Amino acid sequence: MDHVVDHDQLRNLILSDYSRHTSPNKNSTDNSSSYLSTLHLNPVISLPLCLPLLNVNENWLVQFYSLRMMTWCLNSLSSSSSSEIIRKKITSYIPTLLPSHPPPVYLLNILSLTLALLIKHTYPTVWSHPFLYLTSLLSSQNSVLNSEIYCRTLKMLVQELVYDVTGEEVGEGDRRRDERVRDEMRGGKGEGGGSDVESIFRGLLQLIQTSPHPHLQHLSLTTLKLYINWSSITLVMSSPCLHVILSCLEREGLKEEACDCLGEIVNKGMGEEEKLNVLEGLNLIQVFNSTFKTSPSSLSTHTKLTSIINSVGIQLISISESPNPPISTKAGSMMNSWMELILKTFVHDSIIVSGEVLNVLSRWTMCLGKQVGKGRGEKMGGFWAEEYLVKVLSCVFRQMQYQKGYDFNQKENLPELVSVFDSQTLAVEEDDDDEEIYRQEVRKLYAKIVRWQPDQAVQMIGATLGRLPVQLSGSEFEVAEAALRLVFHFQEGLSSKMAKMIGNGGGEKGKIQPKPGSGLKFIGG
């Protein structure tokens, strides 16, 4: 640095730099920005300069810059005395904040980040009980503002310790330190003999349940979500925590955040038996059915719930294939109950909601393929995929149909599709909008089913065409188009060997034939 200034000069530099960036003449020559940008490189000089500027009587921008320099110092200095100086300054500054003149959000964020970095770098060796201090903020006179600081600090802390929010590469030493801090928080040195994480859960749950301020309830629940992933599943599944999360599914403004918390729980890593016990304890089928019936959800909330349905289904199918019979049987039994919810979601009017379960249905086709050629007595586990084949095919045909009013020219596309079908080539150019992408995924699902169960698919095609009330050309366009696709994509789903057999047309033994009486005849046959 070219020169050293006192804190009064530093204040003027900060305000001058802000004025320069907000003035119409941004090209004015001013060395304040250059000096401020290099000041953080020397924390020994910057720390004494910034401390006096952290004062409620100062401009918010000046206070912000002071806190920003403290974060630089905490990430640069290894001296415990320096961090102790910053801690004393911060803890004496917070009580001076006035609810009648609350700081802007950007200042609350940098203040919370400073507290989080103090915990990250000094807990438990220098600052042994930071969470007792944070909890004390909840019972202070300025409870609303301090509660917000409490939540934001915990949010910043978990992002520092668990998630790479900076995008910078983390060194091995930093990674080990973060792991030690997390382990210490999960240990038994918190308030009342419990762990610090338990104390955090109690504080957040208290705010969700008792705060009259919606923004604090929302902030508390979003913060709780961040701690679920690396906290004990026993703590997460405890009666108070689970009760609060499930009750939030029925509270306006908190439904989506509650879904996020449930998503963290069901996707949390654990053993197969423990996973089944957790899913059983959540009783999600009853919870979801109750939520859908009694508490109408927005599309985004419904989509989040459906994402959980998809995730649980994939996990249950996987566990049902376990070589451990008691585990696989229990998972299969649970999956049998879960399939009804999956199919109900699949036929939802919104393609966004319906599309969320395409992955689990694709996983179901893999299970279907593994069970081909096996008798029911040979199956592993209690889930028999073929039991749902007819229902899934029926739902697939329904979802193949474009919604009425879909923007494409019927006069051009229907004859073209018929012509394509006759020539056994695909030449229709389809728009890559959301609707078309969804239909393409449904067709892929259908092709996977055909690959493993072509006989059943043939029967479904014949039954579908036979149910049409009039000739195909006179049917509703959406139904006609979907019916043609059933036939066209049938061959797409077969292996090349099977396709060749059908192309040769014959009725020889071993070759796939339309069911007698279906009214269906293969092209080329």
Image: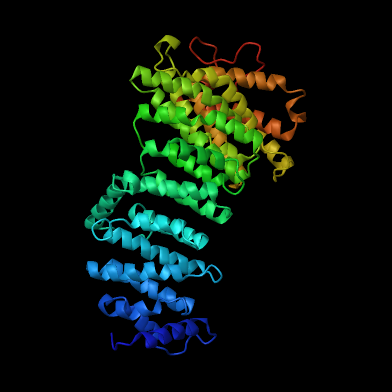
User: Please, is residue 50 above or below residue 506 in the view?
Assistant: below
What residue is shown at x 25% (from left), y 51% (from top)?
180
Which quadrant does the C terminus fall into?
top right
* Left-right relation of 328 to 294: left
Q: Residue at x 46, y 27 (%)?
A: 280
Q: Residue at x 54, y 17 (%)?
A: 455
Left or right: residue 80 versus residue 465 is left
- Callout count: 0
Q: How was the colour assigned to the protein in this rendering? A: rainbow
Q: Is residue 423 visible?
A: no
Q: Quadrant of residue 149?
A: bottom left
Which of 89 and 65 lies nearest the eye of the viewer? 89
In the depicted structure, whether residue 87 falls above or below residue 34: above
Image position of 501 with respect to 302: above or below:
above
Residue 65: image x %, image y %?
41, 75
List x then y, in percent, for residue 469.
Answer: 76, 22
Q: Residue at x 44, y 26 (%)?
A: 317
Give the quarter of the figure containing the N terminus.
bottom left
Is residue 331 at least partly visible in the picture? yes
Does residue 161 sit above or below 329 in this rendering?
A: below
Foreground of the two, 47 or 170: 47
Query: What percent of the width, then of the height, locates residue 388?
Result: 54, 20
Q: Where does the image place residue 234, in percent across and percent down from the top left?
A: 38, 36
Position of residue 214 in the picture relative to residue 323 (left or right): right
Residue 488 occupies quadrant: top right
Name which quarter of the figure residue 427 lies in: top right
136 or 80: which is nearer to us?
Answer: 136
